[in-house]
């Protein structure tokens, strides 16, 4: 087991315990910061979010607040384990089906879109905007592809307790532009 795997195990357990104790309240607190994301881009843009699993900070109240401000929401879809994720439009109540990874995702009939902002879960983040994810590389491949296509912002959503001194990184790891927690906005210098 390498350093990243050991860290992932410890942080997953810590995040789950925090989620069980504070998850609902902190998801609501996160939604109160919708103005930060609204200011990132003009209203009417497409924001990719996710449906939470395994103790991830629940972005659904934030998604509702962003919709009220005029943004469209989409969700990631895995169509092949080795390919970048694609994104399909999503509204609360839309039918979802398991994608190739078994994660609930919009059906193939939902419009495929390119997001302007990607909100993504993480296990840990540091003060330089590096993140530690689950380890499959899905978001890293997808963010690298989105960077090639144009001006897309990558924003992690995390509990405050998920900030660490330093995340171990590899050459393929994509850094974040910002991280939003229930109490803070962490901005990182990115071109």
Image (tube, rainbow, N blue to C red):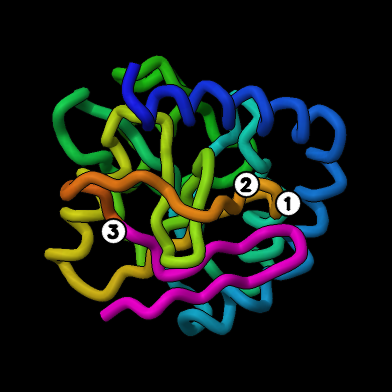
Disc ID at residue 114:
3
Classify mark 1: residues with Cα within 10 Å, few (<14), some (14-19) or many (20+).
Answer: some
> Quadrant location of the N terminus?
top left
Element carrying mark 1: helix
Q: Is residue 159 left or right of residue 176?
A: right
Residue 146 vertical position relative to residue 112 in the rendered view, above or below: below
Specify whether residue 70 is in view. Answer: no
Nearer to us in this view, 90 or 150: 150
Q: CA distance from mark 3 to mark 2?
A: 28 Å
Residue at the location (28% across, 58% down)? 114
> Quadrant location of the C terminus?
bottom left
Find disc 2 in the rendering and name its residue: 162
Tell me where the magenta segment starts and ends, as one range.
175-191
Q: CA distance from mark 3 to mark 1?
A: 22 Å
x, y percent for residue 103: 44, 22
Residue 140 vertical position relative to residue 31 in the rendered view, above or below: above
Nearer to us in this view, 75 or 96: 75
The quarter of the picture where residue 144 lies is: bottom left
Disc ID at residue 61:
1
Look at discs 1 and 2 and give the one toward the viewer.
2
Disc ID at residue 185:
none
């Amino acid at each position: 087991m390498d350093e990243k795997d050991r860290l992932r195990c410890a942080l997953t357990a810590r995040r789950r315990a925090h989620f069980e104790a504070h998850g609902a309240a902190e998801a609501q607190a996160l939604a109160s910061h919708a103005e930060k994301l609204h200011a990132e881009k003009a209203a009417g843009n497409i924001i990719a979010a996710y449906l939470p699993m395994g103790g991830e900070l629940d972005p659904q109240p934030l998604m509702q607040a962003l919709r009220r401000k005029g943004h469209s929401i989409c969700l990631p879809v895995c169509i092949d384990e080795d390919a970048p994720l694609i994104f399909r439009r999503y509204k609360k109540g839309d039918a979802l089906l398991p994608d190739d990874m078994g994660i609930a995702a919009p059906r193939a009939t939902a419009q495929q879109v390119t997001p302007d902002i990607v909100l993504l879960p993480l296990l840990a983040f540091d003060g330089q905007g590096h993140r530690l994810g689950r380890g499959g590389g899905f978001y890293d491949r997808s963010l690298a592809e989105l960077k090639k296509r144009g001006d897309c912002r990558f924003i992690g959503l995390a509990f405050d307790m998920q900030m660490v001194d330093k995340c171990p990184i590899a050459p393929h790891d994509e850094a974040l532009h910002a991280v939003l927690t229930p109490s803070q906005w962490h901005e990182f210098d990115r071109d």
